[in-house]
Image (cartoon, helix red, strand yellow):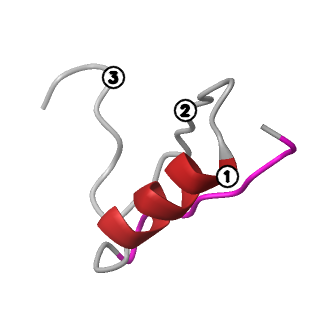
Amino acid sequence: MTPNAPAAGRRTARSVTVRDVSWGTYEKLVAAFDETPRVRLTYDWG
């Protein structure tokens, strides 16, 4: 096990911020990740 690896069964929070995304692009991202249960997307006015 590497020193920074989470313990077995433990989740780590991760986030990615993408700026200047149009509503249309956001909808495409939502559709692309529709089958991925561990991905949550939110839209904050572009």
Figure quadrant of the C terminus = top right
Tag 1: Cα neighbours inside 10 Å, few (<14), some, or many (≥20)?
few
Question: Which badge, 1 or 2, is on the more N-terminal residue?
Answer: 2
Q: Is residue 41 magenta?
A: yes
Question: Which badge, 3 or 2, is on the more N-terminal residue?
Answer: 3
Q: Secondary structure at mark 2?
A: loop
Residue at image coords 65%, 41%: 22
Residue closest to the eye, 41 or 28: 28
Residue tagged 2? 16
Identity of the residue furthest to the left in this view: 1
**Left or right of 46 on screen, residue 17:** left
Give how far apart the Cα atoms at labels 3 and 1 are. 36 Å
Identity of the residue furthest to the top in this view: 3
The overriding secondary structure of the stretch rendered in magenta is: loop
- Can residue 23 be seen? yes
Figure quadrant of the N terminus = top left
Residue at image coords 70%, 57%: 42
Residue tagged 3? 4
Residue tagged 1? 23
Q: Secondary structure at mark 1?
A: helix
Q: Which residues are magenta?
A: 37-45
Total numbered badges shown on the rendered structure: 3
Question: Which badge, 3 or 1, is on the more N-terminal residue?
Answer: 3
- Image-quadrant location for residue 4: top left
Tag 2: Cα neighbours inside 10 Å, few (<14), some, or many (≥20)?
few
